[in-house]
Amino acid sequence: MKVLVDTHCWLWALARPEALNAEAAALLGDGETEVVFSAASVWEIAIKSALGKLRVFTHDSDSLFDILEEQPITRLPILHSHARHVASLPPHHGDPFDRLLIAQAQIESLPIMTADDQFLRYEIEVIWAARQKPRRRRR
């Protein structure tokens, strides 16, 4: 199975694995799962780290990037088609990083692992990662 991982799910797997539900933890720990990590998430980590919004993690952004480089992941670049597709998405989600991940999931036909219930409002396959159930229902 191939799965695009939302930024916070990867950060949880690294720093707070207990936040992930059993299915998400198993998929991330399964050598058969092709974990896809977007350049949009690298960009998000860099920006949020520079703004001091990742202080809850014991790693600084350079350490996070070093750890990321060591992971057996597939790197997904941001293509023009991904960026252009963002404009066609309904405005359910206001976060630009998440909108780009949603566009990538649609364009690349990838399920996305997330704990953000706004993703459930889009035409994508969501693998729910949090222990608690989502607050919103699908579309």
Image: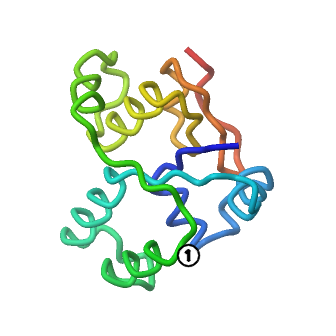
List x then y, in percent, for residue 31: 74, 62
Question: Residue at 27% of width from left, 38% of height from top?
Answer: 79
To which residue does mark 1 refer? Answer: 15
| Location of residue 65 (image quadrant) | bottom left
Q: In front: 81, or 56?
A: 81
User: Which corner quadrant holds the C terminus?
Assistant: top right
- Colour setup of the view: rainbow
The picture places residue 133, in percent across and down from the top left corner, at: 70, 39
Task: Tell me if 58 is positioned left or right of 136 in this view.
Answer: left
Residue 7, position as x, y percentages in the image:
44, 55
Q: Is residue 74 left or right of residue 64?
A: right
Q: Nearer the viewer, residue 76 or 121?
A: 76
Q: Residues within 10 Å of mark 1 (few under 14, many from 20)?
A: some
Picture residue at 70% right of the left edge, 68% below the top: 18
Secondary structure under badge 1? helix
* The image quarter in which residue 64 lies: bottom left
Above or below: residue 62 compared with residue 82: below
Residue 84 location (% of width, % of height): 22, 25
Q: Is residue 86 above or below residue 29?
A: above
**Amino acid type indicated by mark 1:** Ala
Q: Is residue 76 above or below residue 63?
A: above
